[in-house]
Amino acid sequence: MPLTEDSILIIKVFDYEKILKNKLLGEAIYPLKDLIRLGAQEATIALKDRDGRVGESRLNLYLEYSKPTLDPDEDMEEAGALEDLGGAVPQDEAEQEVELTPGDPTAAKKKKSVIAAPRSTMDRSKLSTKKQDFQVRVNIHEGRKLMGGNIHPVCNVHVGKQSKHTRVQKSTNKPLWDEVLFFDFNCSALDLCDEPVTIEVLNSRKIRSDSLIGAFKFDLGLVYESTDHQFVHKWVLLTDPEDKDSGAKGYVKISISILGPGDKLKIPPKSSATDDLVDIESNLLRPAGVQLQPATYTVKIYKAEDVPKMDTDYFEGMKRVLRMQHGDHDLVDPYMIVSFAGKKLKTKVMHKTYTPEWYQELNIGVQMPSMCEQLMLRLMDKDHFNKDDIIATHFLQLTRLSSADPDDEGFLPTFGPAYVNFYGSPRESIMDDELEPLNRGCGEGCSYRGRALVELQVNIGQEPSKDELIRDIDSEDLARIPSFLRRRRYRLFVGFLEGTMIHPVDNQVEFEISIGEYGNKFASTTMPAPSTTQPTSTVYDGSHYHYLPWGQTKPCVMLNSQWEDVTYRIESLNLICRTIDRLEGHLKDVKYLMRAKAPLAESAGKLIKLLDELIIDLNEPLIPPPAKLYTDLDKKMYALRGDEMKRIMVEAVNLRENARDIDQAIIEIDSYIYRLQQIATEPQNSIPDVIIWMLCGNRRVAYHRIPSNQVMFSPKADRCGKLCGHVFSVFLKRPSVPDKSNAKRQWKLPAKLQVFVWMGLEDHAKGIQHRPLDGEISVFAETYENQISLLSKWTTRAMPRPKWSDMSGQMKLPKEFFATPPGWRWATDWFINPNMSLSYDTDSGQSVFQDDVFENQLRAPGSDWPSAKLFWTDVTGEEAQSKEEIMCPQGWEWIDIWTVDLNRAVDEEGYEYCLDQSVGGFVPVEKTYHLCRRRRWVRTRKRNPDVRQQAAHQRMVKAAEEGWEYSRLFTTKFHLKQKTMDMVRRRRWHRKMVADNPDRDAIFIIDPSSDAIESAAAAANRTRGKSGDDDGTLQRTMITPTVFLTYKEPHTYQLRAYIYQARDLFSADPSGLSDPYARVVFSRQSQRTKVLNETLCPTWDQTLVFEEVEFYGNPTMLAESPPIVVVELFDYDTVGSDFLGRAIATPIVKLGGEHQMAKLNWHPITRGGEPAGELLGAFELYLNEGAELPFMPPTRNDVYQVPSGIRPVMQLTRIEVLTWGVRHMKKFQLAAVNSPSIEIECGGVILSTVKIKNAKKNPNFDTPSMVLDVFLPVEELYTPPLNIRLLDHRSFGVKPLVGTHMIKSLQEYRRDPVAMVQTIREKMLESGFGDNEYSLEMESADEPYQAPAAPAGEGAAQPTSTSGEEGEFKEDVDWWSKYYSSSGNEQLGRVYREKGYENMVVFEEELENYFDNFTDLAQSFPLFHGKRHEDEDLDEDKAVGYFKGTFRVYPLPADGSDPPPRMLKNVPCNQLVEVLVRVYVVKAFELQPQDPNGLSDPYLALKLGRFKVKDRENYVPKNLSPTFGKMFELDGTLPLESELRVQIFDYDLLSGDDLIGETKIDLENRFLSARRGVCGLPKRYYIAGPYKWRDAELPRQILEKWCATQALPSPVWRGNSQVYVNGKTCCLRDYETRGQVHKDWGPPEERLALYTLLDLGLVPEHIETRTLFNPLRPEIPQGKIQIFVDIFPKSGTIPPPINITPRAPQDLQLRVIVYNVQEVVLSDTSFTGEKMSDIYLKGWLKGQDKKQKTDVHYRSLNGEGNFNWRYVFPFKYLPAEEVMVIKKKEHFFSLDKHEEKYPVTFVVQIWDNDIFTPDDFLGLLELNLNFMPKANKFAKSVSLDDLPDNDKGKPVPMVSLFDQKNVKGWWPMYEEGGPGQPRDLTGKVEMELEILSKEDAEAKPAGKGQEEPNENPHLDPPNRPATSFLWFTSPWKSLRYIIWNNYKWYILGGLILLLIVAMIGLFIYSAPGALSQKLISQI
């Protein structure tokens, strides 16, 4: 990893302690900035203690640095593996820079800092949340440098809640496990990434509580984000989880892969023999805990505003009644919760306030880097009785608040001080709110719910204490806040031009505009504003939807609000967004040209223009933040955006100058878009979104949110919002919680609006907002006059509402109450202005309407009906005119006469009966008690279009005469025509105002204290006194005027919608098809196309003409922003229609004089946000005001077609169809498909095959080749899809549709047969070959081999032996030699390559993947049936069958000349063929375990039709990567038995065998293909030797057949060294350039034919690697298998098979003689104080674990030991793989021995023998006998540097015992010191190692130790010193050699002293007696 100028070197000095924790002595930090520049440097630095004080210690350093040159691919792979996500960081310091993985489009451009941005290279939020099957494979390879001595390590792996472990490896610090552990999950990809993974290594010898050696932990997200979702051969550092500072505990090498649906299984490569020399640290993952740094996230919560009411006012009213509370209080008790990284803190509760002020600071302590990427702010309401309510939730995305780009220095997350806006459910909803999850942040909030002023800071260094978690904000921070609270006045203007696509509603519709709390009609805390439109009744559009008849008076909304001045943020954001929009638009054009096969120059020119405009856009400067108002984030984002835009600009300039490939340039530009999108965010935009609400009555129905920056105005056009000042369409949606159950409900659009929106500062609002609309804004005062009907007279007496009121009737508004606001004046007097939407009758929008009237009869009880009273009513029972009195309305005409409606539940005369008409309950059967009956008369009329406008005008004039609206009650819906039951009426009065000062608000203040209102009130009282009206109390209030945008006259347009076709629609019928039709909605009109039955690719070829489409405003403006066209597709059903999708298009506006024809384009169809097909259409909008319009399109069946200038140019095209047959047909409708036929449909022309008589006997068609001539478009872009349908012919003529398949594009099958033939003839003449030239002449005499080829199939390949010089134990050259060489195993294939043989091809995937699935003759098309929804995948397992065939598409001559020759004429015979199939199974890899022990007992099973083979008795016990080496022969009949299944089962003794996995092979495709997949072609043609030709045909025969099947001329030969085939001349000398010919090669013409065949792309000799799948988990690989298959027709010659039986291991014997040891560590101390050891040695072959011991050399006082001891180890050896083969039972109760392979490693250990305590381990030596260090002749020259993995990295000469046969010398023995600690030399051993074959061992017998026969060589007893003995078995020796030698002088001195003492004692004892005697004797 290269250093940067910010890199530092950290040095820590510790005091080493064996038991206690290492003590830190000092630490030093040294910057490496100068080292990068100088390359080498010396320095002396001082150490600092743990408190940071400089001590007296110094470090002298010498540093060298060379910049690494990393391979880009390796660098990217390493960087992807070392991301600090989920718990792992790089080996370097946490601040080290790492590159992003290739999953990020900016991978090559950006670098991220681990600390600065704790985020992943993959946006995990975009991962699928759908539950799927995943499999995690953990391959534990080996361990190194594990802490401890003589340990028995075992590795435990925990993934999520699952745990598995490896086998125990005994007595080693370098365990070799090489085991694969499998973990299965059924969850979403998002949840899987959060699953933790723990790698633990334990010592199985210790008790459980003390067995852990070390562990490593991370999460699966780290692996999932790596390349191919896998780690390959990564070392992980083990540490103590409870004490990471204790250092490393060892290393484990692992490979991890995650397999999901559709992922390919990649086998990690095997470790090489030189892996012992690999540096672990260069590919190491370290635990993140080692690098975590404490940090504090400080969130300052200042205050909030606009908090909604959360409590009902019921209890507040009760408190006021009970005098428990005085005055009104705010009904909310808010507080704030801050949550991050699983920690939560909350502010104090502010009671009874909508504007709480907390001024608190919340400090959250975390460890950096943190995986959490968002900080949650949740506004809560304190509830004293129930659970606290959630007001709203806001998430701060930390990735948007920080930067990790080292070029920009990066920065930690920061925010504010700034307001954050909260959204959720509507503010009016308090209790039982079904939208409450929106307040939790689940889904898009539909309503503004307040804002809060917050600030975020992150400080690294320490976590807060408990007392610092919550505290008040400092006064200094509070003092700087007012500068951020400065408000400015903004004005929002919205003009509603159209409201269409409205579904039927039960009340009038109005729309509300709000921004924040401003404009909310239900809010009481803000000033009133004209924020809602007038309630309007909807009108039927004549087809399906309703619209709002606004006409020439368009409702407008003008809304004033006050917000912070954040224009500098919004304008910078809009500038980047405009750049992205332009770039995406231009790039879309370039991609369209590429898809349409446009000339390269045109596409390149468009691309250059794109780059030029991009460079200009990126040169536009951003707005710097103001000096006193900017935040830290403003400053850093300004720098970040500027630097990123400069980098992109430089790259764009380079791309423009150096681009050579358009496709690569498009990829690069896509990365520009991605990078610009990353900086096109503004988290500090404190202005809320603009929300448009649709209200029906007072109920909120649908909404739409518009980000405020998109409509914000700027004086500079490039910095305006993209929607500001433009007319655009808005699709409203219903507020809902994300839920799949609501998906169908969300498909229906509540309404579509066409609006004009402008928002900006009030300083910019003077005349700007309405000028582009070309209309006049009119402001009116509005009041309603109300009357009630009493005694059939209209009066104002006894009314429930005032005579003059607002529309709701709740406020009294006499005309006299209105006074002009300041700055405004009256322009007109009061006038009647009725609501014209009421003038539309029920027949509005209808072209045909049916009038009805009911004839009613009443009778007395017992009387007859003829005498009954007759009267006429409508359906509601109200009195109506008789049918004779009903006149046809103006503009209509009758089309039939009055008839009785019998299509109802009535009797024969049309009557229905009931007891009483007012009660209802009509029934069709007469009873005697029935007193009333009625029948319905109907008559149909149609509209006369000539008088339509005139009648509408007269209707409106009549409505405006009086303007009364009638209704039964004031609370019910009003209508224009008076009815009998109407009891109330009202009419609307308007008075227009004009503004003298546009800056003043038009707000009427109704104040009862004013003199004018008092006089008006008195006059009103006098009038009311006369009329009897009841007066109410007049209160001061404010009301808003009504605003309209008025136009004089509309402009009339004509829309022509050219609906040509659609493709890939959803199937909605049980048949698997649909009956689609399209409904086109434009403006206030909608029409539909004809219904096409049973198709998913309909071709309507229809033009829908929309006449008299009216638009108001300037036509030029409409051309700049055309209204959109909505095309909805439905499946027609008798009852209802299923929604298929919706497409949106923009018409081409032609105002006159334009001659450019519209072009058909494919428009995407979506349903619920998911792709649902494509629509091919075009749309033209003509201004129809006197200009001459184009002629109407031609008609067909009374339907307009798409005109010839727009419809695609057609040409006669031939589609050759090869209908080979059907395969794998499943049952349909519980019956087998026995007699299928195929229909091929394209362009409306259908070609049908003859039915198959019996698909079970022969599933092929009798006539495979057919021709379909059809007119198709010349441009491929417009070509209709080709549909394949399969029908089954059953009894009684029933032909159900079984399945369908659609081919979207025919480009794959297009050919030009004329050009192909002409090209071959021209090349043939150019090469000098005549048409009939053929001469087979042999080469000159120097041709080494002239003999004819041997007959095919003569003899099998026999292996040959190598020469003796290659070693006695080396493998023979056979098929396995070829396999190893071809597999890339350089060591095992060395002999094969030295002999000059060629490799075969080992394919890493299925063979068909490399040869286009062998579909050159026929493809398999899956057929699907049934109803498919958008959430269902197109899985081939759901196919009902397959159609096998292919197509050839080419144009026919336009002049009618003879067609070209057919291309599918030389097809093979499609009759039944009997074949012999040979399946060679080589190996299997990574099989899924099936047994509880984590292994399997695999065996093979094959199935071909009814022929089954199970090799159960030859199962391989306990193996996941078995080597089979089997060949199976199966008989089959094609195509009846065309699918070969190779299965691997797990053998079970008691229960049924489990299927591990299977693979399927289509033998028929291989047999029919011209690629010749029946038998691979070798690279050389041998007629003898081990690799003799094994095919049934000779190469020349194969070449002749290939030319015939390809419709090519036969090969033309010139002699036997040149041949002309397929336009190419092939010469033998071009392939055999070495000048030497092998003795086993065949004739030259056969060799040349073979070389030619290989050049033509025929299948070479190969082994294919196939993936196994299990039907229970069809998308998860279960392992891989290597096989190859040969297919031979039984009618020809069948060659012998190949022998691929695995080699048997050889019986060898290892003899090791241990002579002496020296310098052994003396671990014991005798009671005499001497250092000594009782030395003995253990030896064994690793894997056998059968240890042999020497005898004990007792009392070694100088570290020397003498043994002369022989170890004898028989073992089985496999020379080809250089491994030892061991077969053993896993435990006592195992039934079978399983085979394991180990490197031949001899382990010898030296021990100190103890009697009463466990023996002490002193050291060891491990020797890989194939790669062992060379022995030393003398012990004094032995050191640890003689080992291959020495600490100095010194190269060591290595030898192989199998080559040397006998090795003798000295080797070092050592004890591991743990990771990071050196080894200790614990002794030297002299040994002799010898390898013997079984025969040699029997000829030269030798016993173990010194047992008989003690020969070869004879071992004398060791010459040990006399001091070597066991003390308690030889007491006399102990006295002599232990006591006497060490204490003899002490013993002698003691004896002398004892003698002296005895003499003195005797003297003292005898002296008195002697003296007494002498005295007595003298006396």
Image (cartoon, rainbow, N blue to C red):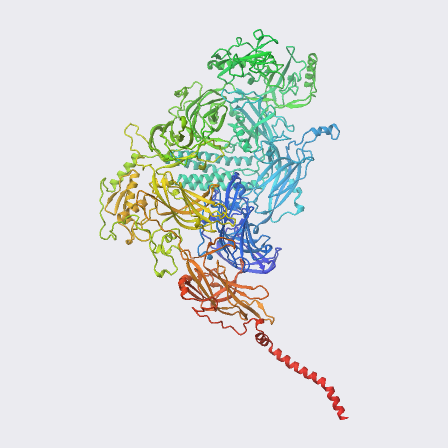
Marker count (numbered): 0
Is the C terminus in the top left, top right, bottom left or bottom right quadrant?
bottom right
In-image side of 1772 versus 547 (left or right) = left
Residue that protrudes farthest toward the front in the picture: 1550
User: Is 846 placed left or right of 468 in the picture?
Assistant: left
Is 669 located above or below residue 1048 in the figure?
below
Q: Is residue 602 above or below residue 1889?
A: above
Q: Position of residue 1061 (x, y in %)?
A: 42, 27
Q: For residue 1455, which quarter of the picture?
A: top left
Outermost residue, top side: 867
Q: Nearer the viewer, residue 897 or 229?
A: 897
Examine the rendering and report whether any part of residue 104 can be seen. Answer: yes
Task: Spot the residue most to the right.
Answer: 1979
Q: Nearer the viewer, residue 251 or 1649?
A: 1649
Looking at the image, which residue is at 27% across and 29% down?
A: 1458
Residue nearest the observer in this picture, 146 or 105: 146
Q: Position of residue 83 (x, y in %)?
A: 52, 47
x%, y% of residue 898?
Answer: 50, 11
Return the x and y of residue 1091 as percentages of the image width and height: 44, 24
Q: Is residue 1158 visible?
A: no
Q: Give residue 1941's quadrant in the image.
A: bottom right
Question: Height in image: 1866 above or below 522?
Answer: below
